[in-house]
Image (cartoon, rainbow, N blue to C red):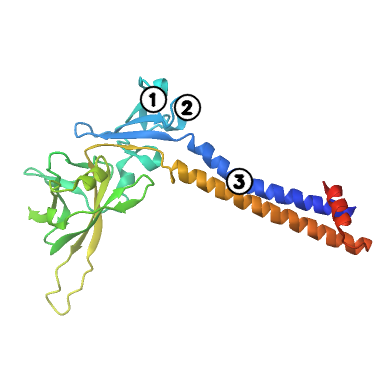
Amino acid sequence: MAVVRLTGLYILYATLLLLSITCPTWQNVESQNSDVVLTVFRETRSDTDRVHIRPAKPGTELDSRYITSKTMNCSETKDEIYAQNSHICTCKESSPTYVVSERQCVNNVWLRRGCAFRFGSWRHSSGWTWSEEGDRLLFLYLDDGYGIAGGFNASNREFERCTLANVTTLTETGVWGKIDFDSKDVTFFVVRHHYHISWNTENLGAESRQEIRGRILKFSITCQPPEPTLHNDILRQPTESCLVFKVTGNFTVSPKRQESEKSKEENTAIVAIALGVTFSILLLAGIVVGMVCYKRRSGTNITPRFISGFIAKIT
């Protein structure tokens, strides 16, 4: 009888194991239902971003965490489909930039982490003034073909030349991803002893233009010091740093689906078949083990009648 109970417990364990495998899938489906659609607006007339937040599916509740951040002010907006579940949020001046991966507005210090280069302005009365970490970000004007141009804190007295290593955009997952650009559209020049960078976006392709619209970008720049002029001069290493700026426009972020509905159905069928086969194997193995142990203890031969009687006992 102890062997029969042991076999029953083995089958119960196999069932619970299969349930533990499938539960995360159910949880993932449930979490997908709480996704939201975000539309971020970045305009030159305001240093603070705006974002339209609504649930991904009509009729579902909007998670309050998306609209209760202390870094932005939110209010309901009328929507024919989403009614009172739609909100417009405006970033506060202390945290003027909305970051999708954080689902909230942040101070520009957060975006400039690791970047020592700063854009600046020059006046006859005071000379060069460089941006602080938390100051407003410079804009790249996308639609008029102007692009972006500005001086930064790298002097031609200290560096012989500066070059652009790459251009990256802050992705929806919070990492900086490289984008394609034509190096012929990027120019470095010196005014009042400091390097300037100019990126003319007039010839930017439609796909690349859409990719950066309304986004946060970063120039990764390498500035090379002059070669030593004397034998005992110290060889200085290049300085590598970055400049962060915004692009005018808006973009929408929708919940990503890793597969199409058809692919999901196919994968669900495959998983169901695999689980069914696995369960059958575990069940069969448990029965065989139970019968062998029972035979050894009772000395009974394994016959069809014995098998049918044993299965009846454990079920």
Circle 2: is it few (<14), some (14-19), or many (20+) Cα within 10 Å?
some
Q: Which residue is under mark 3? A: 22
Asked if marks 1 and 3 touch (Cβ < 8 Å), the reply is no
Q: Where does residue 103 sit, x and y in percent of width and height? A: 40, 38
Q: Residue furthest bottom?
A: 231
Q: Where does residue 74 sit, x and y in percent of width and height? A: 37, 26
Q: Where does residue 274 sit, x and y in percent of width and height? A: 61, 52
Residue at 20% x, 54% y is 181
Residue at 23% x, 46% y is 207
| Count of numbered badges drawn on the protein | 3
Taking 260 as reference, is 270 left or right? right
Q: State the SS at label 1.
A: loop
Q: State the SS at label 2.
A: loop
Instruction: State which tag comes first along the sequence, 2 or 3.
Output: 3
Discs 1/3, front: 3
Q: Residue furthest front?
A: 304
**Residue type at tag 1:** Ser
**Residue type at tag 2:** Thr
Res. 86 mark: 1
Residue at 61% x, 43% y is 23
User: Looking at the image, is 41 positioned above or below residue 270?
Assistant: above
Determine the image quadrant of residue 297: bottom right
Determine the image quadrant of residue 268: top right
**Residue type at tag 3:** Thr
Q: Is residue 159 visible?
A: no
Taking 68 as reference, is 106 left or right? left
> In terms of depth relative to the viewer, which is nearer, 206 or 45?
206
Label 1, label 2: how far apart the Cα atoms are: 11 Å
